[in-house]
Image (tube, grey):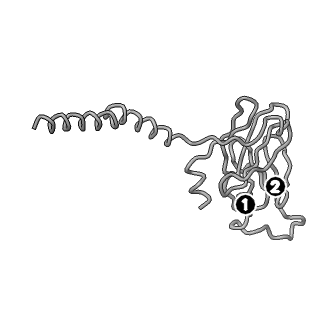
Amino acid sequence: MQHKEQGGKKKDQDDGSQHPPHHHQQHHHQQHQQQQQSPALPLCKSSEIPEGRWKVFTVGSADVLVGRKEGSGRLFAFDNSCPHRGASLSKGEMHGDNIVCYMHGYEYNVFTGKLENMKSWKKEASWVEQSPEWRKSGDLVLYEVFEKDGHVYIVVSDDHHRHHQ
């Protein structure tokens, strides 16, 4: 009988040391907070994107254009697919803060994502403009980018994953 009691106490002590309840809950809570934050992925060295240039990176299922503004050195990042007709924006050129799509000349602000300018296709008064449905365009899908310790990082949120599925 006495031997059995000691065995029971020993077992309780083992259970307690394997799973200290207070510490375990705290640890689980910290993990949960980390999962809620959007992960930042390293893309390249800062020196790989000089002012006035950009590169395209594959992030998940998206091609993301990451560039640096001439003059200010400010970074920007957005989905490389033009919201108008899906053309590759990396083939375009900068016009102030806007990226100009090479295909139809639509201009999007690289910092706000907004469509700023639509080129008119009318070369003569008799021409009929493209239909409003065809001309319609959404805004750029922007990504948050930042620099740390000489590297460029991109923040990928659940919103971007949902957008591409």
Toward the viewer: 138 or 24? 24
**For the residue carrying disc 1, how many other residues have a C-alpha within 10 Å: few (<14), some (14-19), or many (20+)?**
some
Residue 89: horizontal and vertical position, in percent? Answer: 79, 54
Question: Is the C terminus in the top left, top right, bottom left or bottom right quadrant?
Answer: bottom right
Write the residue at 69% across / 40% down.
42
**For the residue carrying disc 2, how many other residues have a C-alpha within 10 Å: few (<14), some (14-19), or many (20+)?**
many
Toward the viewer: 30 or 46? 30
Residue 160: horizontal and vertical position, in percent? Answer: 60, 52
Toward the viewer: 94 or 132? 94
Q: Amino acid at mark 1?
A: His
Write the residue at 73% across / 55% down.
63
Q: Which residue is mark 2?
A: 101
Q: Amino acid at mark 2?
A: Cys
Quadrant hosting residue 150: top right
Residue 22 higher or lower than 107, as above or below: above
Horizontal side of 151 relative to 124 (left or right) equals left
Residues marked 1 and 2 touching at CB (< 8 Å): yes
Write the residue at 32% across / 33% down.
17
Q: Which residue is mark 1?
A: 84
Question: Is the N terminus in the top left, top right, bottom left or bottom right quadrant?
Answer: top left
Residue 104: horizontal and vertical position, in percent? Answer: 82, 60
Residue 105 higher or lower than 111, as above or below: below
Marks 1 and 2, how far apart at CA: 9 Å
Quadrant hosting residue 62: bottom right
Residue 164 higher or lower than 146, as above or below: below
Q: What is the count of numbered marks? A: 2
Q: SS class of the residue under badge 2?
A: loop
Which residue occupies the extreme right position in the image?
Answer: 124
Quadrant hosting residue 84: bottom right
Q: SS class of the residue under badge 1?
A: loop
